[in-house]
Amino acid sequence: SMLMLHVGFWRGKATVENAERWGHGVCSILTPKVLNHPGFFGFYFADEPRWNGVRAINLQLSSDVLKKITPYHPTYIVAAPRGSVEDHIPYAATSDIYGIDIYPVPEGSHSNLDNRTLTCVGEYSQRAAAMVEHRKPVLMTLQAFAWGELSKRKLIYPTPAESRFMAYDALLNGATQLAYYSLRHVVTPGFIDEINAVTLELHR
């Protein structure tokens, strides 16, 4: 198993000097022991930064600092399924891996496209590939929970067929890797077995 660390990014006034000062603090976490550990893969850089009002320049400056500290550990951003491809291009340019989280079960739950069915997963994968101009890995985050675990909605999990469809729909439309959110919310143990069956199939 390998780990992505979340060390954050500089959020204040966007200057090289400020970002470098932030980097000095990060170095207290990224010790040589951490950087050289075989289980350290890279950085979970930012979660839905455009949706949360983060400026792309802050991500770029922080990315530049991280590359000076460790050029061989990639950064990954997961974006919200909101905004146009053009809106995302400046953000995608700041990371090594980019992707979108999309959780469309039950139908209409999450997509911001006209298509609010399961097939929106493939459409968002195509959009993510365009956001990185087809030059970088696309890591799509798929649904491994029921919206009813996070709100007062009815507890509806993706069926095994839906989970399997979403995985292949993503991979056939531009995704190069998949992640799942979020098993920590699951209250029905059998659903975890169903997701594990899909990931095992993909692994094989």
Image (cartoon, rainbow, N blue to C red):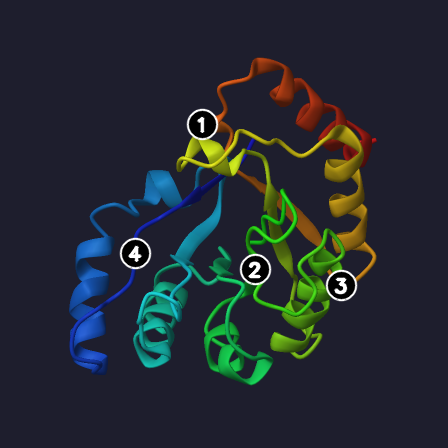
Q: Amino acid at mark 2?
A: Ile
Whether residue 53 sits left or right of residue 37 in the image: it is left
Q: Amino acid at mark 4?
A: Gly
Label located before the other in sequence (1 or 4): 4
Label located before the other in sequence (2 or 1): 2
Label located before the other in sequence (3 or 2): 2
Where residue 8 is drawn, which disc sits there? 4
Label located before the other in sequence (3 or 1): 3
Q: Residues within 10 Å of mark 2 (few under 14, many from 20)?
A: many
Find residue 31 and report its horizontal and vertical position in percent. Answer: 29, 45
Q: Dividing the image into 4 quarters, which one contains the N terminus?
A: top right
Whether residue 28 can be seen here: yes
Where residue 100 is drawn, which disc sits there? 2
What is the C-alpha distance between the residues marked 2 and 1?
Answer: 20 Å
What is the C-alpha distance between the residues marked 3 and 4?
Answer: 27 Å
Quarter-of-image position of residue 17: bottom left
Q: Residues within 10 Å of mark 3 (few under 14, many from 20)?
A: many
Label located before the other in sequence (3 or 4): 4
Where residue 174 is drawn, which disc sits there? 3
Query: Which numbered mark, 3 or 1, is in the foreground of this view?
Result: 1
Find residue 57 and report its horizontal and vertical position in percent. Answer: 33, 81
Query: Closer to the camera, 20 or 149?
Result: 149
Find residue 181 and report its horizontal and vertical position in percent. Answer: 52, 40
Question: Badge 1 is on which residue?
Answer: 184
Find residue 167 and report its horizontal and vertical position in percent. Answer: 75, 45
The secondary element bearing badge 3 is classed as: loop
- Residue at the image position 81 percent from the left and 47 percent from the top: 168
The secondary element bearing badge 1 is classed as: helix
